């Protein structure tokens, strides 16, 4: 269990530094990534493409990160607060003009062989849209 918590903390520390390679190093080659209120993407290369889309459209920092792991460490969850800026239009979403937002988020994880094998992200999309549309 401590290894699971440390892995997820390392994953989020890399996110906050913008160190995409360090994030990818935490993932299994065939990682399943469930995007917020979207589809499942599979594999590290798909995750790399997701990070590139995120980097183009958003600047985010996560605070108040709390990581919880199940006994045995195979599953875990994290809760955090997203502080962000919407930099460039993202397909199907409102136009970007540097709007700032703050909202709670969370993720669920599954581990395999010391790596993250699944990450499922969630935040309230309607709250985010309201904040960037105000």
Image: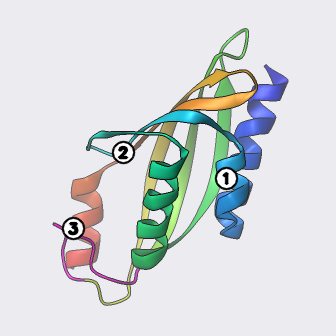
Magenta region, main secondary structure: loop
In contact (CB < 8 Å): disc 3 and disc 1: no
Q: Extreme top residue here? A: 72
Dot placed on the residue nearer the N-terminal end, 1 or 2:
1
Residue 41: percent from left, percent from top: 37, 41
Q: Residue at x 16, y 66 (%)?
A: 92
> Does the magenta segment cover residue 35?
no
Q: Residue under circle 1? A: 23
Q: CA distance from mark 3 to mark 1?
A: 29 Å
Q: CA distance from mark 3 to mark 2?
A: 20 Å
Quarter holding residue 34: top left
**Relative height, residue 125 to residue 92 (above, below):** above
Q: Residues within 10 Å of mark 3 (few under 14, many from 20)?
A: few
Quadrant housing the N terminus: top right
- Residue 35 showing in the rendered view: yes
**Callout 2 secondary element:** loop
**Relative height, residue 59 to residue 111 (above, below):** below
Q: Residue under circle 3? A: 130
Tally of numbered discs: 3
Dot placed on the residue nearer the N-terminal end, 3 or 1:
1
**Callout 1 secondary element:** helix
> How is colour applied across the structure in the image?
rainbow
Q: Which contiguous range is marked in magenta?
A: 85-95
**Relative height, residue 37 to residue 81 (above, below):** above
Residue 114: percent from left, percent from top: 76, 26
Q: Residue at x 80, y 36 (%)?
A: 6
Q: Residue under circle 2? A: 35
Quadrant housing the C terminus: bottom left
Q: CA distance from mark 1 to mark 2?
A: 16 Å
């Amino acid at each position: 269990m401590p290894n699971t918590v440390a892995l997820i903390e390392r994953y989020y520390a890399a996110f906050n530094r913008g160190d995409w390679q360090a994030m990818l190093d935490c993932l299994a080659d065939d990682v399943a990534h469930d995007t917020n209120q979207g589809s499942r993407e599979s594999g590290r290369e798909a995750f790399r493409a997701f990070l590139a889309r995120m980097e183009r459209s958003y600047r985010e920092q996560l605070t108040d990160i709390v990581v919880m792991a199940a006994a045995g460490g195979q599953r875990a969850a994290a809760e955090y607060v997203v502080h962000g800026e919407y930099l460039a239009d993202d397909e199907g979403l409102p136009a970007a003009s540097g709007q700032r937002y703050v909202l709670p988020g969370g993720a669920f994880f599954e581990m395999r062989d010391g790596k993250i094998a699944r990450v499922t992200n969630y935040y309230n999309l309607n709250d985010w849209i309201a904040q960037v549309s105000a």
